[in-house]
Amino acid sequence: VLELQKVFRRVLCVDLDVHHGDGTERAFLHTDSVTTVSLHQLEPGFFPGTGHPSATGRGRGTGFNINVGFPHGTNGAVYLARLEQELDRLRSTTGYAPPDAVVVV
């Protein structure tokens, strides 16, 4: 993402694995130039225990950090359907500019 920011003004980073993208979230929590979307397992006791939907960013980054938690056993079709919903919601948000680059991690 840092390399993409050297070339592109706005970057969308999508994290699709089972664990919350807590490092990516921390890195871009305060900026509106990187939108992070993390889809992950979210249950009590599951590592790293972060990624609650209420964590949406801070300062200029408010609204540019999206966390979607799922219970154990959620399949890929459900992940992708929810990702589409979140991207549709972003596109319809007043003032949201589409990304110039997208990275999936």
Image (cartoon, rainbow, N blue to C red):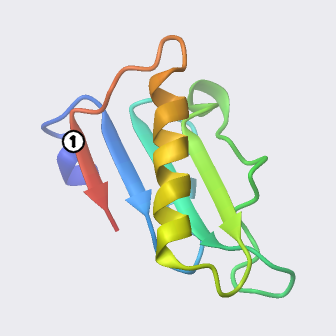
Residue depicted at 81% across the width and 79% down the height = 43
Kindly give the residue lying farthest to the top in the view shown. Answer: 94
Relative to 79, residue 2 above or below: above
Residue depicted at 75% across the width and 86% down the height = 46
**Residue 34 on image: x %, y %:** 40, 39
Tell me if residue 27 can be seen. Answer: no
Kindly give the residue lying farthest to the right in the view shown. Answer: 44
Q: Secondary structure at mark 1?
A: strand
Q: Quadrant of residue 68?
A: bottom right
Give the side of residue 99 with respect to residue 35, left or right: left
**Residue wearing tag 1:** 101
Relative to 78, residue 19 above or below: below
Residue depicted at 18% across the width and 34% down the height = 8
**Residue 103 on image: x %, y %:** 27, 55
Closer-to-camera residue (74/39): 74
**Residue 85 on image: x %, y %:** 54, 44
**Residue 9 on image: x %, y %:** 24, 28
Which amino acid lies under the numbered mark 1 shown in the image of this protein?
A: Ala
Q: Residues within 10 Å of mark 1 (few under 14, many from 20)?
A: some
Quarter in which the C terminus is drawn: bottom left
Tell me if residue 86 can be seen. Answer: yes
Relative to 8, residue 66 above or below: below
Give the side of residue 29 with respect to residue 13, left or right: right
Residue depicted at 57% across the width and 56% down the height = 26
Closer-to-camera residue (57/43): 43
Number of numbered callouts drawn: 1
